[in-house]
Amino acid sequence: MLKPTAVRRDLRLRPVRPAGWWFDALLLVGLVGLTVALAADQLFGLDRAVADWADGHRPAAAYWVARVLNFLGQGTPLTLIAAGLGVLLAVRLRSVRPILPPVIAFVLTNLTIGPLKIWTARAAPSASVKEPFLTPEQTLPLFHDDLPVRFAQSYPSGHVANAIVWYGVIAMLLAPLARSFGRQLPARLVTVIRVVPPLVVLTTTTYLGWHWLTDSVAGLLLGLLLDRLLHRAPWDGVPLPGRLRGWDRPFTSYP
């Protein structure tokens, strides 16, 4: 009589594109290099030029269109949408695994974006025309430790980083959710969901003067790095406590 064999979970990292860790290293080096350059008072001319151009080309209609589109990067609604999709998919598959990506994404973003903002302590371009009413030159440098935290949280752009992370998680959950209803989500649509909203947020947040261009670029680099980590995770193979083994069906490989 054959003895039953234990099911071995596949803990191999999931593929990402571009493949390999070289691109992650490139993103990290880019983020560190950009931060070092700004700390050395470099790239301020570029930031100032982009902000001045936006200030001079912002009619009322364009302002309101950009402001509405910028809501695509609101972290709290995106978090709730991703969590809701995870719960819905969990109920449909009878598995707690779909809840894991939103939870880990929430932890990662809170452990990286917020602390970086507080550490770098950079004011936004608009800090010269509203409270705390700095001179234009004073808004550019990092490490404004003498300012209250609420006035010095511009670098990196949380809107951009959050948009990349959360739309990535949403796309990750939407595909298996559609399959659970007997539908197939086109791969091109998944790509659009992951790419278009973050690009819109990057453009609008810079155009509105809410972030310097380098803030948005830093948010892009950090967001892509976190997104790749989340998409690498072997969500279907993560060991779960024994009491949850009845709710551990895979979801990324759900047919």
Image (cartoon, helix red, strand yellow):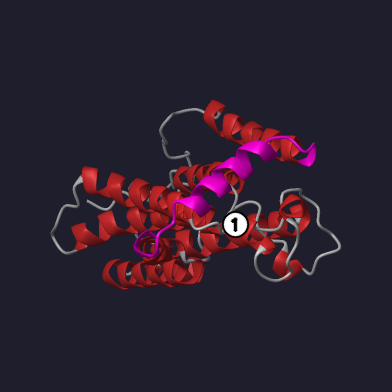
Judged from this view, the residue extending furthest toward the right is: 146
Crowd class of label 1 (few under 14; some 14 to 19; many from 20; radius 10 Å): some
Q: Which image quadrant for residue 81?
A: bottom left
Q: Secondary structure at mark 1?
A: helix
83 vs 32, left or right, is left
The stretch in magenta equals 39-62
Image coordinates for residue 104, horizontal then vertical, percent:
54, 60
Q: Residue at x 63, y 56 (%)?
A: 125
Q: Residue at x 59, y 41 (%)?
A: 49
User: Where's residue 83, x and y in %?
Assistant: 42, 70
Relative depth, front residue between 176 and 125:
125
- Amino acid on which disc 1 is placed: Leu
Residue closer to the observer: 115 or 52: 52
Q: Is residue 9 visible?
A: yes
Label 1 belongs to which residue? 108
Q: Residue furthest left?
A: 182
- As for residue 56 lying within the magenta part, the answer is yes
